[in-house]
Image: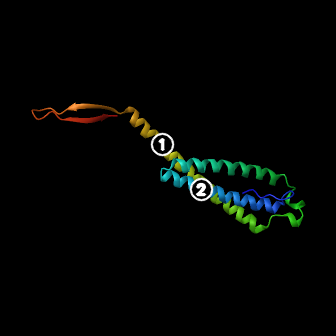
C-alpha cells in the first residue's frame, strides 16, 4: 500500500496515498462488521490487525503531511489538487460514519455478551420431580 520512490514523495502523492489508506480503512471496518454479523472470529481478528496497521500508517502519513511547508509557501507543482482534497474529505466523512456504526455495533455486541455471560453464570439447573402418582418424570428448571 505504501508508495515508494527514489526520493521524497511530493505532497500530492502523499495525499493520494492518504486517500487510499482512508478507503482501505473504511473497507476494513465494513469487513469487521460483516465478520461480527456472521460470527466469524478469525475474519474479525484479521480485520482488526489490518485496521491497526492502516491506522498506524495513516498517523505516520499525517505527520509527514503536516511537516510540509504551509499551503501558501508550497510551489504550485507540489500542491494538492482541489479535486483530490474533496475526495479525501468525502472519504474521511464516510470513514467517520462507518466508525460510528462500528462503535455502536461493538457496544451492542459487548452488552449482549455481558448479558449472556451473566445469564449463564447465574443459571442454577436442578432436576425436579413432577408430583403425582404418574411416572416420576424429571424436568429441568432454571433459576436466574
Residue density around tag 1, few if under 14, some if 14–19, many if 20 or more, within 10 Å? few
- Judged from this view, the residue extending furthest toward the left is 133
Visual colour scheme: rainbow
- Judged from this view, the residue extending furthest toward the bottom is 83
Residue lying at 66% horizontally and 47% vertically, measured from the top left? 52
- Does 122 appear above or below 60? above
Residue lying at 59% horizontally and 51% vertically, measured from the top left? 47
**Which mark, by number, is residue 98?**
2
* Residue that mark 1 sits on: 111
Q: Secondary structure at mark 1?
A: helix
Q: Is residue 123 left or right of residue 88?
A: left
Give the position of the N terminus as an image quadrant.
Answer: bottom right
Q: Is residue 121 left or right of residue 22?
A: left
Which of the two residues, 130 or 50, is positioned nearer the viewer here? 50
Residue lying at 65% horizontally and 58% vertically, measured from the top left? 24
Q: Could you give the CA–CA distance between mark 2 and mark 1, rounded to whole angstroms?
A: 20 Å
Nearer-N-terminus badge (2/1): 2
Residue 72 in the image, given as x and y percentages of width and height: 88, 61
Amino acid at each position: 500500500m505504501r508508495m515508494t520512490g527514489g526520493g521524497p514523495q511530493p505532497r500530492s502523492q502523499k495525499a493520494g496515498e492518504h486517500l487510499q489508506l482512508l478507503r482501505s480503512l473504511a473497507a476494513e471496518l465494513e469487513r469487521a462488521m460483516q465478520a461480527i454479523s456472521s460470527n466469524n472470529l478469525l475474519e474479525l481478528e484479521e480485520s482488526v490487525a489490518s485496521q491497526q496497521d492502516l491506522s498506524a500508517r495513516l498517523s505516520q502519513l499525517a505527520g509527514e503531511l503536516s511537516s510540509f511547508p504551509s499551503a501558501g509557501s508550497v510551489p504550485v507543482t507540489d500542491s494538492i489538487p482541489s479535486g483530490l482534497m474533496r475526495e479525501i474529505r468525502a472519504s474521511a466523512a464516510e470513514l467517520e460514519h462507518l466508525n460510528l456504526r462500528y462503535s455502536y455495533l461493538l457496544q451492542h455486541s459487548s452488552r449482549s455478551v455481558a448479558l449472556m455471560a451473566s445469564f449463564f453464570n447465574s443459571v442454577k439447573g436442578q432436576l425436579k420431580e413432577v408430583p403425582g402418582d404418574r411416572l416420576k418424570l424429571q424436568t429441568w428448571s432454571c433459576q436466574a
